[in-house]
Image: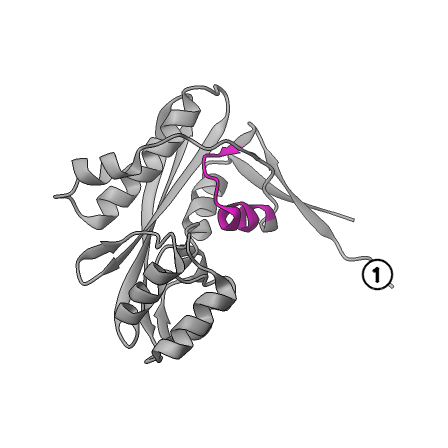
Amino acid sequence: MKKKKKFSIKTKLPFILASGSQVRKRILKDAGLHFKTITSKLDEDFIKRKFKDKSYTFICKKLAQAKAIAVSRKYNNHHVIGADQICVYKKKILHKPINKNNAIIQLSMLAGNEHKQISGCSVCLNGKVIYSFSSTAKLKMRKITKKQISNYVDTDNPINSCGSYKYESKGYLLFSKVIGDQFTIQGMPIFDLFNFLIKRNIIKYEWFE
């Protein structure tokens, strides 16, 4: 039987993910990128207040940039990836619910309606942003009952999830229509990120026996 070829990602410089998100870590690891994780102690609410009159995509990119810059300034000769996410419903940012009651309230608002998930991503080197972008997904949630919402929250416990659902778990079953990719919805828009890294020859795929 012919052996399957494996692959790895070769990098010129080491990588750091400036995020504590387990979902973002899993997405990058599944893609084959080797990195270490260092979270930045960023006051996200300050940035959101400072740029409250700007567009949601602008705010999201600023959050991602601030995370990456804060870590990059301490680690020279590392490529630092910063990412952040904003859930928007009727021109209002929905913050992480933190508890089950707030999650039920948010999902009750979203039920039967459309909302957006905006993910921002930045790459920094030696304290400077070398790439920054945002990606948007539109989602329409099914008309679900309060009982179904409560059961879902008990199942996935999405209290730290943007929009009060874990799309990577059972959350995707809540939706009747999605425009955009799953990585944007999960907060790590990897297609645009890897397109840049490959184009700039920062990463390179290698296959081996």
Residue at image coords 35%, 25%: 128
Quarter location, residue 142: bottom left
Left or right of 186 on screen, residue 14 = right
- Mark 1 belongs to which amino acid? Lys
Q: Which residues lie in the magenta part?
A: 16-29
Quarter location, residue 12: top right
Q: Is residue 76 magenta?
A: no
Left or right of 5 on screen, residue 133 = left
Q: Position of residue 148 (x, y in %)?
A: 41, 77
Query: Can residue 125 be seen?
Result: no
Residue at image coords 30%, 37%: 44
Residue at image coords 24%, 43%: 59
Residue on which the image places disc 1:
2
Q: Residues within 10 Å of mark 1 (few under 14, many from 20)?
A: few
Q: Position of residue 64 (x, y in %)?
A: 35, 39
Q: For the residue labelled by badge 1, is the local secondary structure a helix, a strand or a loop?
A: loop
Quarter location, residue 121: top left
Q: Position of residue 10 (x, y in %)?
A: 62, 36
- The residue lying toward the viewer, choosing from 156 and 192, is 156
Quadrant location of the N terminus in the rendered image: bottom right
Query: Can residue 132 be seen?
Result: yes
- The residue lying toward the viewer, choosing from 124 and 161, is 161
